[in-house]
Amino acid sequence: MSTVADSEAVLAEQGTSLWQDAWRRLRKNRLALFGLCVLVFFVLIAILTPWLAPYAHDAQDLDLGAAPPSAAHWLGTDIFGRDLLTQIMYGGRISLAVGFVATAVALVIGVTWGAVAGYVGGRVDAVMMRLVDILYALPFMIFIVLLMVVFGRNLLLLFLAIGAVEWLTMARIMRGQVQSLRQQEFVEAAISLGLSPATIVRRHLVPNALGPIIVYTTLTIPSVMLLEAFLSFLGLGVQPPATSWGLLISYGAETMEEYPWLLIFPGAALTLTLFALNFFGDGLRDALDVRGSGD
Amino acid sequence: MALLSVRDLQVDFTTRNGRVTAVNKISFDVESGKITAIIGESGSGKSVACYSLLGLLPSPPASVECGTALFEGRDLLAMSEAQLREIRGRDIAMIFQDPMTCLNPYMTVGDQLVEPLVYHGKVSKAVARERALELLGEVGMREPAATIDQYPHQFSGGMRQRVMIAMALINEPKLLIADEPTTALDVTIQAQILKLVAELQHKRNIGVIFISHDLSVVADIADEIVVMEKGQLVERGDRAAIFERAQHPYTRKLLDAIPAGSKAVSSEARDDLITVSHLCTWFGQGRGREPLRAVDDVSFTIQRGEVLGLVGESGSGKSTIGRSLLRLVPITSGEVLFDGTDVTALEGVALKQMRRRMQMIFQDPYASLNPRMSVYDALAEPLLLHGIESRKTVEQGVLKLMDDVGLARAFVRKYPHEFSGGQRQRIAIGRALATRPEFVVADEPVSALDVTIQAQILDLMLELGREYGLTMLFVSHDLAVVRHIADRILVLYKGKVVEQGTGEALFERPQQEYTRQLLQSIPGRLLLA
């Protein structure tokens, strides 16, 4: 194994970065791969919905009313006779977009904020974290209502508003991680090599803090989706005829005794997404942990 | 009859890659009033053997395959968990390597001492407390009455180990198993603890199993020595037989690994690379509080190409000096001239340039490497950062470093956790040398390592030092190690330099009381002299 030719072959065939290594490990994890496939599948459907959906998103058949699954309507129809499959497909566009975009916003702000506060420490840290505390203390609803009133109802704004609230916890987790990591000698070693603080945070601290961050991210995506449902329910989010999984579920819940399929199918779509997310999230965490047994 | 008689003990571990025999058919005896030392490197199965006697190994994966261990005529290996619980702590007690992690930080020392007594002895709390006070006195605790209600963090490492010993002795055990009890301690403290164990064992006429990786540690106290390698018992004999007539090559290798002798001093005149004058590094000053004077008015010089040893106990400020020179901690006052440039005033690009020229090797190879970076990335980072290699040539540069520090090139994609402690330290050395530094601070680079590995790493450092023309500041609490590697030695006590000179001068003619005390603490010095 230790001949020069061999080792150069090893060098050539394997990736350099943590992410390439992680991908190599992830591919061996069937459950995580399955999760990823489901997610990609859902996202693809969401993107292609306008071409794939069996009916127009606002097509009604008031004479039909709420009908159970049939050959014409695979997943049945709601009380207005709208095709449920079409509704779920259009709803998925909103729900997935909210889930991913708002979480991405939270992730970027939270990780950066937390890492800077944790690494720099001292007065900067105190000011930054007090700001987080203040935002925590702000009633979330009032914050959103204010935004909506000032800027008008706007889907993008909704994403940003949710993201702007979710990053607070992310920042706290990141700060805690960075604070304990920066005590370690490898950070001191990096300083004595002459690396800049930004590089130390990016290359040495963030990768080591990813485990809890990924777990929290997979928890954030579903909670963001449900938050959107709640806001929509209050009339602050998406409005009919546009819809989302959260809205479908909350309407379905109202009529679940007479028309159970109106709850079951949107619920199944959300549940399947959450399962896939969790499998993928766990797999990603393991894959990024080089100490894991994946190799 | 022997107090404990172990015959044909075999312990296997079931791992993902099949069964591994950790302890392979070993036999030994422990007599009352005698100390039996079990010596071996990490992974030799010495701890596993002892833990299996008390049923302390998690099973699975561990399983005792065969053997007997007669303790006062009863077979420990055949006992039920309930029977073993009766024996653990009462008849057989243990002390562990790290006294901090073995004490509950949220319980006072007194409460922890009393616990096993109340549990096993069924005596009242008041009586137990009396016993605890008495014992704390016996293990050399000053003012037991005042310290019994303190918490573990209020004690120093040595004091905590005394508490652990008191705890082990409180039920009057007949057998004491000590698993590397002094490895985490300073040399001077180690000497005190060793003396204490020998005294207590003698006075109470109990049997002791003393586990260590270091033959020199047990040189003064062991009656019987058992040497283990890779689960096998390779040699067994009384102290004189092992130290004077060792038969097995592995035993001889262990003996050879004990650092001894001074480095030959070269007499050629060289210019000063580093001049430190009136260096002070204080912590926690301000707000009217008295600062901790970690380094207090220290001045010295290091010549180009010289290895300067810095010796002292923990808390003497020796690591802080190293870190101050490299600007890793803020300096309170004083001047550090490196090749004529005042390091303390540098900022920005100039500081980065200077950092390339001075590097550090850390004590703990487990903490000093980023666990998420492969060896390749760890070594490539400094090469690229300082433009020593371009993107195209960096691969060759990394492989060259691997060769230099004696690591197989095929390991280059592995992560730190896949390496042993010694190999990790080689990676850390490689990283420090990557920037082609002129000066390296080595902060206890071998104290976390087994003795045999220690010797290899020291040799590697000496060799690379010559090859790269390095000037080195070698920080250690271990005089024997420093004497082996350093041209000149600085003895530090409470932030001040108390004595300096060549290794030979210090060892032959120590001027200060403290230096003498340090010298007397070197384990096995009489046997090895």
Image (cartoon, rainbow, N blue to C red):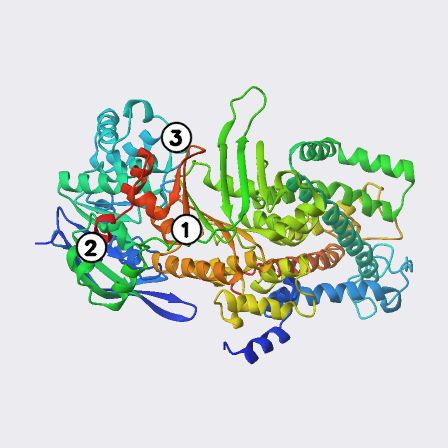
Q: Label 1 belongs to which residue?
A: B486
Q: Position of residue B208 (x, y in %)?
A: 20, 48
Q: Position of residue B90 (x, y in %)?
A: 21, 42
Chain of the residue where label 2 is placed in the rendered structure? B
Q: Tell me which numbered mark, 2 or 1, is placed earlier along the sequence.
A: 2
Rendered position, A275 above or below B347:
below
Residue A230 as seen in the image, left or right of residue B206: right
Most distant residue in the left direction: B1
The label on residue B151 is 3
Q: Looking at the image, which residue is at 41% across and 60% down?
A: B459
SS state under label 2: helix
Residue B257 picture quarter: bottom left
SS state under label 3: loop
SS state under label 1: loop
Q: Looking at the image, which residue is at 62% across and 72% down?
A: A14
Cα gap from disc 1 to disc 3, whole angstroms: 39 Å
Residue A89 picture quarter: bottom right
The label on residue A51 is none
Q: Is residue B183 visible?
A: no
Cα gap from disc 3 to disc 2, whole angstroms: 35 Å
Q: Looking at the image, which residue is at 21% across and 26% down?
A: B127
Crowding at label 2, few (<14), some or many (≥20) Cα neighbours within 10 Å? many
Q: Position of residue A216 (x, y in %)?
A: 64, 49
Label 1 is placed on what type of residue?
A: Ala
Q: Label 2 belongs to which residue?
A: B76
User: Which mark is nearer the camera, 1 or 3?
Assistant: 1
Rendered position, A142 above or below B478:
above
Crowding at label 1, few (<14), some or many (≥20) Cα neighbours within 10 Å? many
Q: Looking at the image, which residue is at 51% across and 64% down?
A: A293
Label 2 is placed on what type of residue?
A: Leu
